[in-house]
């Protein structure tokens, strides 16, 4: 019984120490936003069944934008739509220094038709998505 009381006191103390700490001082507002792809490095062709890493370069327009390897990857027939997602800090001061970041996407060539990659590049005057479009044919292994 004595050990049970000791464990109970330790548990209550541990729980209280966890709940009494607050990181509210570190909290800040942010939102997620699609960012523009400036370039993509793809092979001239895919060999059916092999896996590749596509190098994608994006533009972060100021110091409030951070990239944490997040992107939306949509299938649309034989096309792949790729939207990089940036974390954008709100209500903080930012400098206007833009920077480029490169990340990679794994792609396994499983379809026989050419792949059409559409990398998000922003919106046009009519608020329609624009893309850097690259087609990669698929060949059979030698």
Image (tube, grey):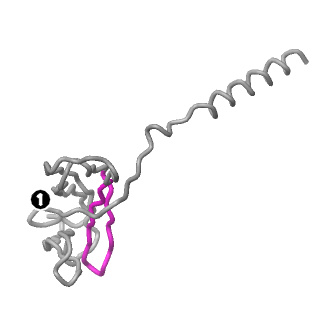
- Residue 74 in magenta? yes
Q: Nearer the viewer, residue 99 or 23?
A: 23
Residue 79 position, x and y percent, is: 25, 77
Mark 1 Cα-neighbour bin, 10 Å: few <14, some 14–19, many ≥20: few
Q: Residue furthest left?
A: 44
Main SS of residues in magenta: strand
Q: Nearer the viewer, residue 63 or 72?
A: 63
* Front-most of residues 22 and 134: 22
Residue 106 belongs to magenta span: no
Percent x, y of residue 76: 30, 79
Residue 42 visible in image: no
Q: Residue furthest bottom?
A: 126
Number of labelled discs?
Answer: 1
Q: In this rendering, is residue 73 above or below 59?
A: below
Q: Which residues are magenta?
A: 69-87
Q: Which residue is mark 1?
A: 41
Q: Is 66 situated left or right of 45 in this image?
A: right
**Quarter in which the N terminus is drawn:** top right
Residue 138 in picture, x, y percent from top left: 17, 71
Image quarter of residue 4:
top right
| Residue 80 x/y as whole percent | 26, 72
Q: Would you identify the image quadrant in which residue 22 lies? A: top right
Question: SS for tag 1?
Answer: strand
Task: Point out the image quarter for the C terminus.
Answer: bottom left
Does any portion of residue 43 appear in the rendered image? yes
Residue plotted at (26% across, 67% down): 82
For this rendering, which residue is in front, 63 or 113?
63
- Compared to 81, does 1 lie above or below? above
Q: Residue placed farthest to the right in the image? A: 1
Q: Residue at x 24, y 60 (%)?
A: 50
Give the residue displayed 45% in from the left and 43% down from the top: 27
């Amino acid at each position: 019984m004595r050990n049970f009381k000791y464990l109970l006191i330790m548990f209550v103390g541990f729980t209280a120490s966890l709940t009494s700490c607050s990181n509210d001082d570190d909290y800040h507002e942010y939102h997620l936003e699609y960012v523009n792809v400036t370039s993509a490095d793809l092979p001239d062709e895919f060999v059916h069944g092999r896996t590749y890493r596509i190098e994608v370069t994006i533009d972060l327009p100021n110091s409030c934008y951070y990239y944490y390897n997040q992107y939306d990857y949509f299938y649309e027939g034989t096309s792949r739509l790729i939207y990089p997602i940036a974390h954008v800090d709100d209500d903080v001061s930012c400098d206007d220094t833009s920077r480029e970041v490169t990340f990679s996407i794994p792609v396994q060539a499983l379809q026989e038709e050419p792949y059409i990659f559409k990398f998000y590049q922003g919106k046009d005057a009519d608020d329609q998505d624009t893309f850097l479009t690259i087609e990669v044919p698929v060949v059979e292994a030698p």
